[in-house]
């Protein structure tokens, strides 16, 4: 499958988001398998329980707040924005974010193009910069429909785009992850980096929503 698909047609028929999983539901087959394999590897000395704890602690530090800082820096610093679009992996490393063994490609939303991220095969996701993916991102419904009918999916998230805007869908892989650089909203011309970062949401960096203009006057 190619890295992106252009769509410029609407699909008016309604759809629903996939249901959220019940946190009290029995473990799935994959969850049971993960536990069994982890316990077996610990028992055989491949790694220890402390290694697992440190990895979990590392995952806990990976949240969309990191992505928000990246976006805010790009909005304020044109030179950084160019580096980010040219080599996302290297640019986020400037802010202390290690993409580990994957390549990060950053795609920019403009008045003419809106980008949407998906992984059609599984749930590849830029965890070092966004943390764990939401359940809907991993669902079969989103993974299939984001490619077939992206405008319908966007509508369900409350994102309505003019007919002239091209929707470009990017399919993540095991080696390559995508991050959307949203458009900076009007009314934030005097905002500092910290204030701008607070406006940026996880969903806007996946591309299912847009960063909303501030409801109040600009702050410094």
Image: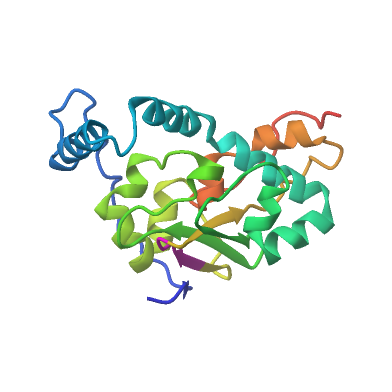
Pick whichever, 216 or 36, lies toward us. Answer: 36
Number of numbered discs: 0
Q: Position of residue 3 (x, y in %)?
A: 47, 72
Relative height, residue 23 to residue 206 (above, below): above
Q: Position of residue 75 (x, y in %)?
A: 77, 49
Relative height, residue 3 to residue 74 (above, below): below
Pick whichever, 211 or 171, lies toward us. Answer: 171
- Is 177 displayed left or right of 53 in the figure? right
Q: Residue at the location (53% across, 35% down)? A: 62
- Which range of residues does the magenta coloring cover? 168-174
Q: Residue furthest top?
A: 24
Pick whichever, 219 or 44, lies toward us. Answer: 44
Q: Residue at the location (82% across, 35% down)? A: 192
Q: Is residue 18 one of those drawn in magenta? A: no
Q: Residue at the location (30% across, 56% down)? A: 122
- Is 197 displayed left or right of 80 in the figure? left
Q: Residue furthest front?
A: 45
Locate residue 196: give its quadrant: top right
Q: How is the image coloured?
A: rainbow
Q: Position of residue 184 (x, y in %)?
A: 72, 49
Q: Residue at the location (19% across, 36% down)? A: 40
Q: Is residue 170 one of those drawn in magenta? A: yes
Q: Position of residue 68 (x, y in %)?
A: 64, 40
Quadrant in the picture for the C terminus: top right
Quadrant in the picture for the N terminus: bottom left
- Is 128 displayed left or right of 83 in the figure? left
């Amino acid at each position: 499958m190619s890295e992106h698909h252009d769509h410029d047609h609407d699909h008016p028929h309604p759809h629903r988001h996939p249901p959220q999983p019940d946190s009290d539901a029995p473990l799935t087959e994959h969850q049971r398998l993960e536990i069994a394999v982890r316990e077996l590897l610990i028992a055989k000395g491949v790694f220890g329980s402390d290694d697992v704890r440190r990895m979990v602690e590392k995952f806990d530090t990976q949240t969309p707040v990191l992505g928000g800082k990246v976006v805010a820096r790009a909005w304020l610093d044109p030179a950084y924005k160019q580096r980010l679009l040219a080599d996302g992996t290297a640019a986020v490393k400037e802010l202390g974010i290690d993409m580990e063994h994957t390549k990060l490609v950053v795609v920019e939303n403009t008045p003419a193009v809106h980008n949407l991220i998906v992984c059609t095969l599984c749930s590849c996701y830029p965890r070092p910069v966004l943390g764990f993916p939401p359940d809907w991102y991993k669902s079969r419904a989103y993974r299939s429909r984001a490619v077939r009918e992206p405008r319908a999916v966007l509508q369900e998230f409350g994102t309505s785009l003019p007919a002239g805007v091209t929707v470009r869908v990017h399919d993540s892989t095991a080696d390559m992850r995508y991050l959307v650089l949203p458009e900076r909203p009007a009314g934030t011309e005097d905002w500092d980096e910290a204030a701008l970062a607070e406006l940026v949401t996880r969903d806007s960096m996946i591309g299912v929503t847009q960063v909303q203009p501030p409801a109040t006057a600009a702050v410094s």
